[in-house]
Amino acid sequence: MPRRAWWVLLAVLVVVFGVTTWVAGQRDEPVPGGVQRLGPEAGEPVADYLRRAGASLPAGHSPYWALVQLDSYLTPDRAAELTRGVRLSRVVFRVPLPRVQTALITRDLPGQQPVPELAAAQQSAAAERLAASRAASDNRRAAVDAAEAAQLHHGCACVLALLVFGDGDALRTVAGRPGVRAVHAALADTSIQDLAVSPLLPEQGDIAGPVPDDGPAPS
C-alpha cells in the first residue's frame, strides 16, 4: 500500500477504535484502587493463575465482564467463533515473533458484528504499528514495528485475548471450548471502566514474566 494511503487509513481507524498499546513483558502498569485486573499479576506462576481464573467463573444468568485468553494466536474469524454466545467488547492483538518483544495492542469493539469488527480492528492496529515504525528512535525498534504492521495488515493469526460480556453459563461454555486457555471473570456489578486487562501470553507456560528479546530483528 502506498505511504500516503497508509497515513489516511491510520487517521480514519484511530478515530473509529479506542487505542491502547504497550510492549509485552515491559509493562506492569499499576492498577488504581478500586480497579480490577483481569489477567495474571507480574511474576505469578501460570498454574496458580489458571486455577484463580477458573475459580472466578460464576454460574447462572447474571452478566459479567470476563477476559477470554487463548492457547494460541488466532485470526479474527476463529476468535469470533470461539466467543460466540457472548458479546465482544475489546480485543488484544500481538504479533508473535521468535524471541522478540512485540506490542500488545488493544482495540474497543462495538460488539455488533464480531468478524468484520475484529478484522477492521486488526487493520487499525497495522496502521498504528506502521506509524510507530516511522517514529522509532532506533533501527531495531523500527524493524520490529514494521514487521508487526506488515503481518497485521495481511491478516495474521494475532488475536491474543478478548474482553467479553455474558452470563455465567455462557462464560463457562466459552471456557470449555478447545483453544480457550482461560476465562477470567470480574466481580459482579463491575463496570468496564473499573477493569484493567493484562492477558496471559500463549508462550508463558511457567511464570507470567517478560518474554525474551534476544532474537534477531526482522529484515
Image: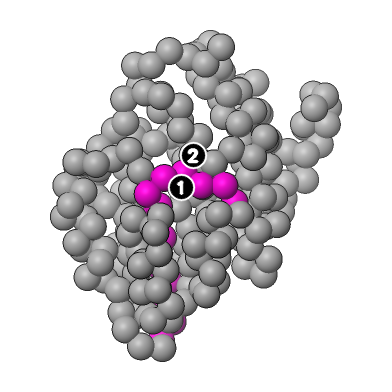
Q: Position of residue 44 (x, y in %)?
A: 18, 47
- Magenta stretch: helix, strand or loop mostly: strand
Between residue 205 and residue 92, name the one nearer to us: 205
Dot 1 amino acid type: Leu
Residue range corresponding to the magenta coloring = 62-76
Disc sitting over residue 142 in the figure = none
Q: How was the colour assigned to the protein in this rendering?
A: one colour
Picture layout, residue 52 above or below residue 206 = below
Q: Are marks 1 and 2 in contact (CB under 8 Å)?
A: yes
Q: Position of residue 122 (x, y in %)?
A: 63, 45
Answer with left or right where residue 148 lies relative to residue 43.
Answer: right
| Residue on which disc 2 sits | 94
Q: Position of residue 215 (x, y in %)?
A: 38, 16
Residue sitting at the far bottom: 61
Residue 112 drawn in magenta: no
- Check disc 1 and report its element: helix, strand or loop: strand
Dot 2 amino acid type: Arg
Q: Earlier in the sequence, mark 1 or mark 2?
A: 2
Residue 65 drawn in magenta: yes
- Taking the spot 36% from the left edge, 66% from the top edge, the residue there is 175
Between residue 176 and residue 186, name the one nearer to us: 176
Q: Position of residue 38 (x, y in %)?
A: 34, 59
Q: CA distance from mark 1 to mark 2?
A: 6 Å
Answer with left or right where residue 56 lies relative to residue 172.
Answer: left
Number of callouts in the render? 2
Disc sitting over residue 160 in the figure = 1
- Check disc 2 and report its element: helix, strand or loop: loop
- CA neighbours of label 1 inside 10 A, class few (<14), some (14 to 19), many (20+): many
Is residue 29 in view from this perspective?
no
- CA neighbours of label 2 inside 10 A, class few (<14), some (14 to 19), many (20+): many
- Taking the spot 40% from the left edge, 64% from the top edge, the residue there is 177
